[in-house]
Amino acid sequence: MAEAKSKFESVREWVAEHKLRTVGCLWLSGIAGSIAYNWSQPNMKTSVRIIHARLHAQALTLAALAGAAVVEYYDHKTGTKAERYAAYIPHKDAE
């Protein structure tokens, strides 16, 4: 019987399968959080608040993309990605 996966392993596996969705969600939460934070700051123009929110979300997105690249590198290095797609690749032995 297979050992139950830990919560961390389940999350890592989901992130590895849905990298772009993860980056998009992080961007959206980053911009929403930054807008909420900037709106609490007095004496700031609306345009400046929006620009700051965009810059914070952009920095978070770059960090998320770098994290996705690390996950992709790890998958290639360990061979888990090759194992995952092996069933879809035709082999000459199967003929």
Image (cartoon, grey):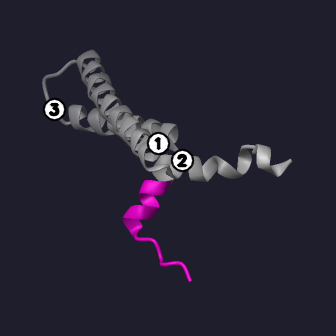
What residue does disc 2 label?
81
Q: Nearer the viewer, residue 54 or 3?
A: 3
The kind of residue tagged 1 is His
Picture disc at residue 41: 3
Q: Nearer the viewer, residue 40 or 11?
A: 11
Q: Is residue 61 left or right of residue 84?
A: left
Q: Real-space Cα distance between discs 1 and 2?
A: 6 Å
Q: What secondary structure is marked by label 2?
A: helix
Q: Real-space Cα distance between discs 1 and 3?
A: 45 Å
Q: Position of residue 36 (x, y in %)?
A: 28, 38
Mark 1 vs 3, N-terminal side: 3
Q: What secondary structure is marked by label 1?
A: helix
Disc 3 vs disc 2: Cβ atoms closer than 8 Å? Answer: no
| Residue 6 belongs to the span the image colors magenta | yes
What residue does disc 1 label?
76
Q: Position of residue 56 (x, y in %)?
A: 26, 28
Q: Which residues are magenta?
A: 1-13
- Mark in the foreground, 1 or 3: 1
Quarter of the figure with the N terminus: bottom right
The kind of residue tagged 3 is Gln
CA neighbours of label 1 inside 10 A, class few (<14), some (14 to 19), many (20+):
few
